Amino acid sequence: MTNIAVIYYSAYGHTYELAKALEAGAKSSGAQTRLRKVRELAPDEVIATQKGWADHRVATQHVAEATLDDLDWADGFAFGTPTRFGAPSAQLKQFIDTAGPLWLKGALADKAATSFSGAMNAHGGQESTILALNNVFYHWGSIIVPLGYTDPIVYESGGNPYGTSNTAGDAPVPDPVLKTAFYQGTRLARFASLIRP
Ligand SMILES: Cc1cc2nc3c(=O)[nH]c(=O)nc-3n(C[C@H](O)[C@H](O)[C@H](O)COP(=O)(O)O)c2cc1C
């Protein structure tokens, strides 16, 4: 069976919704999955000042934290993060920066990898954030699986070929965006199963 790890950071819950939809897509393709959040780095007193952030943290206490074993175990992985000024969140980057030992032994090479993001504004940094994550995959020797324009749902959700992108406000993630994340999960699982040793 193909193993897929979906590893994400989310402060207010939008990226979490994308991660769940992507995981469901991978599962629907027959993959075994692990949905993992990365460790929160912000101080409790800062999180407590923002109700949405604090509420989401409580609501996702049941989600296990990502470990390096999840990357080692996976035949393919998806990374998701809200944009932070056009770049990945520090929380996800911190997790990535612990992956040196796996990189050193080549354990991340030849694995399928894909990424997804969200921002407040329609052009608020989704693409640059995804591309920044993908730069990591080049260094790891992973095989990047983009959305491309391979399905009509990509157009319906904003037409971003790099990866699923949400435009957040306080609104829930729109259905076409969730469907795109689901589709991205099916694509990841398909390519991971093709290239796994
Ligand atoms: C420090 C910080 C920087 C941000 N930078 C941007 C930005 O440059 N452009 C933008 O549109 N949204 C920006 N946002 C908004 C978040 O990307 C948006 O709220 C996020 O996608 C919501 O995802 P989440 O619900 O998973 O946390 C920023 C948010 C924070 C806290």
Image: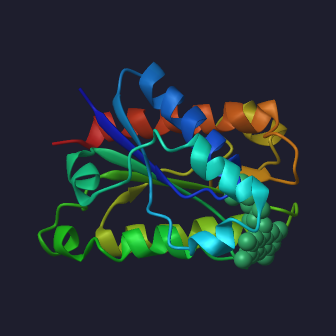
Q: Is residue 21 left or right of residue 32?
A: right
Residue 1 as seen in the image, left or right of residue 172:
left
Q: Quadrant of residue 101?
A: bottom left
> Is 15 displayed left or right of 113 in the figure?
right
Identify the residue shown where x is 69% and y is 30%. 179
**Ligand 1 found in image quarter:** bottom right
- Asked if residue 39 shows in the view, the reply is yes
The residue positioned 70% from the left and 34% from the top of the image is 178
Please determine whether, in this image, residue 149 is positioned above or below residue 82. Answer: above
- Residue 88 occupies which quadrant of the picture? bottom right
Q: Residue at x 25, y 59 (%)?
A: 68
Name the quarter where the N terminus is drawn: top left
Residue furthest to the left? 105
Residue at 65% over, 48% down: 56
Give residue 80's position: percent from left, percent from top: 55, 55
Residue 53 image point, x, y percent? 70, 58
Question: Of 52 and 190, which appears nearest the observer?
Answer: 52
Number of callouts: 0
Q: Relative to 89, is 194 above or below?
A: above
The answer to whether residue 160 of the structure is visible from this angle is no
Q: How is the image coloured?
A: rainbow
At which x and y percent is residue 2?
Answer: 27, 32
**Rendered-image quadrant of the C terminus:** top left
Task: Pick the residue in front: 34 or 149.
Answer: 34
Q: Residue 139, image x and y in percent?
A: 34, 75
